[in-house]
Image (tube, coloured by chain):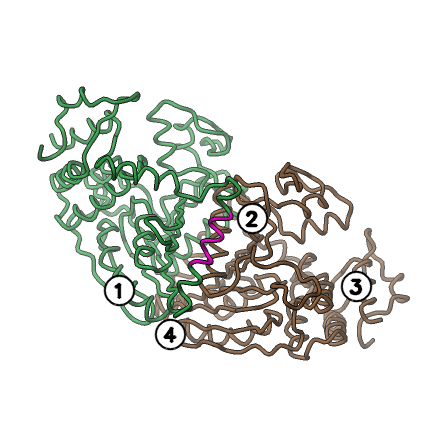
Chain colours: A brown, B green
């Protein structure tokens, strides 16, 4: 089978409720590439986006996996992204690497900047990669885990459109502003987290809406600034920051670091693309890499082993490290050679090829 | 008056309940220096600590102001700090400045590293200062605000002793692990925050205990891992992270960055000094500085003005920026030329001179 299963093949593959489809890794890669190029993405962009969404889907990351192809295509239709954009290195001095995505998807710009970021961090001890004028839809953990896979420590932040009220406020102003971090560990998986500084990722609210479920209290306000558990009302109103004023302060920091510091937009200066190519739907991202080797030299292995004592101490209490469910899914799906996705999503994706 | 008011002068100065004492800025400086040198701190350490605690007290920072002189002295008695230690620059390559505090107080090491950190960040765009083997008691905001005062962006993290259970756990393992950030603004005050990644600073629980008040639900667990509102039980049990598993993940990140990354202890590898000079009560700190000028060049003023739009948007909703109460106190106390401290604290401080 060349490019994912056709709809008529699907019925026999339904394995659990809700109805799902099993795709092999290669089938998912091919389906994603085909959809993206069919809608005008250059081969380079299609490859970078595909690597990302399939990697995320292999972790059962349903909110940022293949589901996000729908918004990648919608973005082309709404002129929120240039699917042929060629990112340009616009700065490469000192400890800073700057890549202008030229209103293209952020992932290709990241892949262009990453080797330079790693080199510079190894040389200088700490370095930063800023991505400018990018359409950004993707989980950040793939980026910080790529840094950790090279033995470095990664930290990434980016704003989104204004969806979140500041603590004490009632109207959307801040983005959901995720922060991701990864620390290299022996074995297959790093210590890694990637979370929105809102109580939930926006994608989680969208998934609740698609599933017809209400959202937990504390996630959102309606358009009048009143608490709501209706996902549609929360999407039209405001999300809330996690951790009250502390989460709100962190979210503000993220806007500043990935916005004015690097010369890019604040979340509230952007909005979802609406078909007008002048709409500012692109924004920035900041990724910092730190080199344990630069600090520690010959003591690196010793101190990486010391870090393991912290992880062991957390798990010894019955508490969980972040991302463990994701890593378990990764292992399970790699062993199975593929992934399950909801039938409805599969049908939506196939429909993009019509 | 040379060195703070003597106890018999105090009664007439009681201005509100609870009984308080007014100290001029100079009186506070002199009192602090005198206490510190009387207990064996070198003049350099006494000056650095005094600058810090008086600066914090001028912001009505009661938990980290002059009150902390009590623990600075207790630390000498318990051999947890070398009051004569001379910090040493142990690394000065690339974008990293490393200062070994030699088991002295962290503040003198910070002051030694700061000008180099600023230079390097201006040159490279981003730079880091790590402080090693330090006794650390102080608010971090003074350090990041010193960076913002130079037009740069500052971020600082440090672990504390193991006081906090990870989310889902029951026993102390993580430190209260504060994170502080400052962003330069026109006018007198930066955008700044400094908070513990625990639900409360440990000092806040201590102040509740001193005041005979219970703590809010959610701050702590007793020694059996059960929720408690008794400050003494929580101090003997475990504090809780803010923002559930997200705050817990951030706290873990802070331990890693200011611990194994730089070759220093994790929080749980340290404990409060107990008179044995071999007790590991010292630990590390990581401070990152980022230069808007390095990213923005001639566009710096434009983008700093863009950042102001975010702050204006937060305040337009009736939400508050962090640290505003502190800045208001600073302005009020500077205009008044001094500060109010509780009478009981004043008496405890004076008693240190006996």
Cα–Cα span, label 1 and label 2 = 40 Å
Circle 2 is placed at which residue position?
A320
From mark 3 to mark 2, how far is it between C-alphas? Answer: 29 Å
Give how far across and how far down residue B308 sits, in percent: 45, 53
Discs 2 and 4 carry the same chain letter? yes
Report which quarter residue B213 is drawn in. top left
Which residue is identified by label 4?
Answer: A94
Q: Which residues are magenta?
A: B305-313
Give the class, few, some or many, for how many residues have Cα within 10 Å of label 2's Cα (few <14, many ≥20): some
Closest to the camera, between mark 3 and mark 4, is 4
Cα separation, mark 1 vs mark 4, equals 15 Å
Distance, label 3 to label 4, CA atoms, is 47 Å
Q: Earlier in the sequence, mark 3 or mark 4?
A: 3
Q: Which mark is residue B116?
A: 1
Between the C-alphas of marks 1 and 3, the distance is: 56 Å
Q: Secondary structure at mark 1?
A: helix
User: Is there any visible trace of residue A335 in the rendered image?
Assistant: no
Host chain of mark 3:
A
In-front residue for pair B116/A147:
B116
Q: Is residue B5 magenta?
A: no
Few, some or many C-alpha atoms within 10 Å of disc 3 (few <14, some 14-19, many ≥20)?
Answer: many
Q: Which of pointers 2 and 4 lies earlier in the amino acid sequence?
A: 4
Q: Which residue is mark 3?
A: A22
Q: Residues within 10 Å of mark 1 (few under 14, many from 20)?
A: some
Q: Quadrant of residue A214?
A: top right
């Amino acid at each position: 089978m060349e490019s994912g299963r056709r709809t008529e093949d699907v019925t026999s593959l339904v394995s659990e409720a809700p109805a799902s489809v099993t795709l092999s890794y290669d089938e998912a890669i091919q389906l994603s590439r085909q959809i993206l190029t069919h809608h005008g993405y250059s081969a380079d962009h299609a490859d970078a986006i595909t690597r990302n969404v399939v990697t995320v889907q292999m972790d059962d990351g349903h909110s940022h996996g293949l589901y996000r192809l729908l918004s990648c295509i919608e973005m082309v239709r709404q002129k929120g992204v240039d699917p042929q954009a060629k990112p340009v290195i616009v700065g490469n001095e000192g400890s800073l690497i700057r890549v202008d995505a030229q209103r293209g998807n952020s992932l290709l710009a990241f892949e262009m900047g990453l080797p330079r970021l790693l080199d510079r961090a190894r040389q200088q001890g700490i370095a930063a990669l800023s991505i400018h004028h990018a359409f950004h839809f993707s989980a950040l953990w793939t980026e910080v885990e790529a840094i950790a896979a090279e033995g470095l420590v990664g930290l990434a932040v980016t704003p989104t459109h204004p969806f979140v009220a500041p603590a004490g406020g009632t109207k959307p102003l801040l983005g959901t502003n995720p922060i991701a971090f990864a620390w290299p560990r022996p074995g297959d998986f790093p210590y890694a987290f990637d979370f929105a500084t809102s109580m939930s990722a926006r994608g989680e609210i969208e998934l609740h809406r698609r599933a017809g479920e209400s959202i937990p209290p504390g996630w959102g306000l309606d358009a009048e600034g009143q608490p709501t558990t209706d996902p549609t009302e929360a999407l039209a109103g405001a999300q809330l920051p996690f951790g009250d004023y502390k989460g709100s302060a962190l979210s503000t920091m993220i806007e500043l670091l990935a916005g004015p510091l690097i010369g890019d937009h604040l979340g509230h200066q952007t909005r979802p693309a609406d078909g007008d190519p002048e709409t500012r739907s692109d924004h920035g991202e900041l990724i910092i890499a730190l080199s344990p080797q630069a600090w520690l030299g010959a003591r690196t292995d010793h101190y990486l082993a010391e870090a393991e004592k912290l992880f062991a101490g957390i798990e010894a209490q019955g508490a969980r490290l972040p991302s463990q469910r994701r890593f378990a899914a990764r292992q399970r799906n790699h062993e199975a050679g593929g992934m399950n996705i909801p039938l409805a999503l599969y049908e939506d994706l196939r429909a993009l090829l019509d």
